[in-house]
Image (cartoon, rainbow, N blue to C red):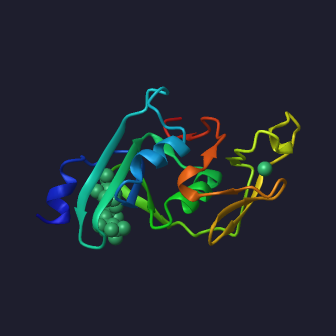
Amino acid sequence: MTDDDQELRVSKIRNGTVIDHLTAGEALNVLAILDIDGSGGEAVSIGMNVSSDRLGQKDIVKVEDRELSQSEVDVLAVVAPKATINIVRAYDVIEKKRVERPRVVHGVLSCPNRNCITNDNEPIETQFQVTENGLRCGYCGMIVRESEVTSHLAVNWVDLTD
Ligand code: CTP
Ligand code: ZN
């Protein structure tokens, strides 16, 4: 089957964001990190292990009536470095962003070290250095693997329906 046939499994959206070219297995992790759990009433479609010319198999996530903020794009770059983010309006892809692995991530990810000062109710923005071995907390030095990061993103998606 071609990519297009496969895409029919997850239908086109009118407005919103398509997070495409996720490595197979990343979809649920991406939803967790972006705090997308459907509780906001948004329509979410998920394709897992969809065949792709470029990747063999890929995951894909479509969220209707929502657009990713820059901090969400930053997080995606860490957990899903191959992702393409497509902004869809009136059924057309109006913007396509390739994520770029940042060197530092500010204020999005949580440090898993309970004793870290960033978990002390202080108004301190977290800061992680992105290294080959994982993310290094700028405050306590703890190394967190990409597959284990958690975010403290509030539900701060930009609503496209306004
Ligand atoms: N898409 C969608 N709804 C739309 C338009 C596009 O769900 N109204 C999805 C497509 O199914 C595809 C992704 O958004 O998964 C990107 O669309 P498009 O740029 O048209 O596809 P390609 O050219 O194949 O993109 P790329 O080159 O990034 O693979
Ligand atoms: Zn820390």
Position in image of residue 81 (x %, y %)? 50, 66
Q: Residue at x 29, y 49 (%)?
A: 47
Count of picture labels: 0
**Location of ligand 1 given as a quarter of the image:** bottom left
Q: Residue at x 66, y 40 (%)?
A: 152
Position in image of residue 11 (x %, y %)? 24, 46
Q: Nearer the viewer, residue 154 or 69?
A: 154
Q: Residue at x 62, y 58 (%)?
A: 74
Q: Residue at x 44, y 39 (%)?
A: 65
Where is the N terminus found, in terms of image quarters? bottom left
Q: Is residue 54 left or right of residue 5?
A: right
Q: Is residue 26 left or right of residue 123?
A: left
Q: Nearer the viewer, residue 129 or 85?
A: 129
Q: Taking 13 as reference, is 139 above or below it? A: below
Position in image of residue 141 (x %, y %)? 79, 58
Q: Nearer the viewer, residue 155 or 134?
A: 134
Q: Furthest-left residue in view?
A: 1
Position in image of residue 131 (x %, y %)? 67, 70
